[in-house]
Image: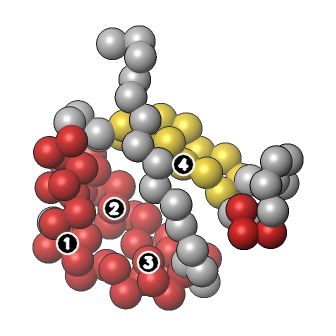
């Protein structure tokens, strides 16, 4: 699980950096305060992308495609939530 996801994460970080993005924040998720059992996650990661096109480019990058088997092996579920940076 975790080792497989870490292999994916290393590649994803390389591609993210190449496309001008960065990890802004990362933390273990200790508990869900409001929600139910379907809202349980191990960690939360806030990722900055230079643009919507950079996000799409990452998703379509061949290096990411080659690493998806590690991501799939390491995740039971995931949620992607699009947010706008209101400070820009």
Task: Give the mark nearer the N terminus: 3 vs 4.
Answer: 4
Q: Is residue 11 above or below residue 81?
A: below
Above or below: residue 88 compared with residue 7: above
Q: Which residue is labeled 4 in the image? A: 45
Return the residue found at the far top.
Answer: 87
The first of marks 1 and 2 along the sequence is 2
User: Which label's residue is closer to the chain start, 4 or 1?
Assistant: 4
Question: Which residue is denoted by mark 3 in the rendering?
Answer: 71
Asked if the residue at tag 1 contacts the one at tag 4, i.e. Cβ–Cβ closer than 8 Å, the answer is: no
The CA span between labels 3 and 1 is 12 Å
Determine contact: label 2, label 3, CB under 8 Å: yes
Q: Which residue is mark 1?
A: 63
61 relative to 22 in the view: left or right: left
Judge from the rendering whether residue 38 lies leftward or rightward of residue 16; answer left or right: right
- Find residue 54 and report its image quarter: top left
> What x and y, as percent, mark residue 79?
52, 60
Q: How many discs mark residues in the rendered view?
A: 4
Q: Residue at x 23, y 63 (%)?
A: 59
Q: Which mark is residue 12?
A: 2
Where residue 44 sits in the image (x, y, percent)? Answer: 61, 51
Task: State how far apart marks 2 and 3 are (Cα).
Answer: 10 Å
Give the mark nearest the N terminus, 2 or 4. Answer: 2
């Amino acid at each position: 699980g975790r080792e497989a996801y870490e292999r994916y994460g290393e590649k994803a970080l390389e591609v993210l950096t190449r496309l001008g993005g960065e990890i802004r924040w990362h933390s273990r998720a200790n508990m869900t305060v409001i929600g139910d059992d379907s809202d349980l996650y191990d960690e939360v990661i806030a990722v900055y992308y230079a643009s919507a096109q950079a996000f799409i480019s990452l998703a379509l990058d061949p290096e990411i495609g080659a690493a998806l088997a590690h991501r799939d092996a390491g995740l039971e579920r995931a949620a992607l939530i699009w947010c706008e940076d209101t400070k820009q």
